[in-house]
Amino acid sequence: MGIDTMKNFKFAIAWVCIVACSLSNAQVKILDKIIAIVDDDVVLQSELNRRMSSIIKQIKQSNTTAPPEDLLKKQVLDRLISERIQLSIGYNAGVRISDDELNQAIGRVAASNNLSIDQYIDRLTMEGTSLSIIREEVRHELIIMRVQQASIMRRIRVSDQELNNFLNSEEGQLVSSPDVNIGQILLAVSSNASKASIDRVSNQAMDLYQQIQDGKDFKELALSYSMDQSALQGGDLGWRNMAQLPKIFSQEIDLLTLGTVSEPIRSGAGFHLIKLYDRRGGDAKLIEQNLVRHILLEPNALRNKLETKKFLQQIKNQVLAGEDFEQLAKAHSEDKSSALDGGNLGWSTPGMFVPEFEATMNNIAIGEISEPFESQFGWHILQVTDRRQQDFSEEILRNRAQNLIRQRKYDEELQVWLQEIKDEAFIEIKI
């Protein structure tokens, strides 16, 4: 069922509910009811019930104490409203998920549970969940993911100067920093909130911090009070690289020991409590690089594969007899970009060459001339003239730093954007 069909279906149900309520003397059973109006869409009681049932099951499986039902219901309804706004944005923008994309996504879900698709469907059936409902939920998740990426990425810019400043700063050293497993409680603050409202939320954050210090379970409080998308997972954010986190978080996390929680941290989105569950890695990662050169010949109408291979073998024999590799490359190599430089390809990085080339390059000794081998480009011989362990090349370092800056900005902007679209939407709660 597509988004437009789903919306028509919901309004049809809503009309049935109105008619059923008006016929007070007739024996009509109300099938469903509207619990929230979100712009021109609705959230139904059945959706809330189904999501509540799923979340309660997850909470039990994680051996976490569930919060009071009214608090959990508020959390779930807030999530459904946020999802409905994002789905509406996606619908209006023409975002659609094909059946092939949907099937692939469900296949990944099944694989993550170490199940085949058929086994996954059988499990759903045993648990009383229909495949059609799962397909619709996954479709919605994919649409929301695309809407978030499209909306947030266009708000993010990383200039060369910003990248250079990052790499030249102490913060830039976090590129090789450890990963941390963290949880979060977020108490959101609207962008146009008054000082009195901000103070009230700040006091609430300090109260939650004190409850945690007194032994209250972090995940239970996250389920009850956090306004982050991770709330229904007990605030779990999973493993994150320290460099992917906003600086205000990484500075605080650096001071935490395992199992401890930060005091409230103020950001543009509100007040955060961060719990450090675990820490790993952080050692320098050395990459093996090869200084390599090659000679490429392509079969043609006058020289088939076998003859091309034989010709390369003759060139190899000339090198072994003492002739200069670079001069032979300039004379014979059909890789025009490297032939003028004697076949030199410079220092390699993993993934730089096609698999056949990399496999040969990585398995010969320095100075050795390879046997002729074939790739999609033709036939090669190559020679590794030097080999080194490098703690990232400049290109890899910059690319990784840029990705980390983008990820950090993405996390910051996502929370602000979610609050913005909620502030701009028409929302009427019916319960």
Image (cartoon, rainbow, N blue to C red):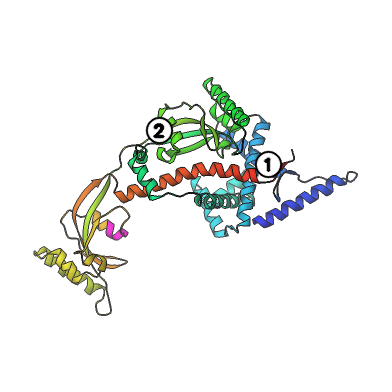
Q: Which residue is mark 2?
A: 279
Residue extending furthest toward the top = 214
Label 2, label 1: how many angstroms apart (C-alpha)?
36 Å
Q: Which residue is mark 1?
A: 48
Observer-nearest of 171 and 22: 171
Pointer 2: residues within 10 angstroms few (<14), some, or many (20+)? some
Residue extending furthest toward the front = 195
Q: Quadrant of the C terminus?
A: top right
Up the image or down, 217 lies above or below 408; here it is above
Return the x and y of residue 166 as percentages of the image width and height.
Answer: 37, 42
Residue 128 in view in this figure? no
Up the image or down, 243 lies above or below 323; here it is above
Return the x and y of residue 192 as percentages of the image width and height.
Answer: 61, 38
Return the x and y of residue 351 as percentages of the image width and height.
Answer: 33, 55
Classify mark 2: helix, strand or loop.
strand
Residue 178 in view in this figure? yes
Return the x and y of residue 115 as percentages of the image width and height.
Answer: 51, 48
Up the image or down, 107 lies above or below 70; here it is below
Q: Is residue 409 left or right of residue 426?
A: left
Q: Residue at x 46, y 26 (%)?
A: 260
- Disc nearer the start of the sequence (2/1): 1
Observer-nearest of 161 and 186: 161
Highlighted magenta segment, given as a residue range:
354-358
On whether residue 233 falls in the magenta region, the answer is no
Disc 2 residue type (three-letter): Arg
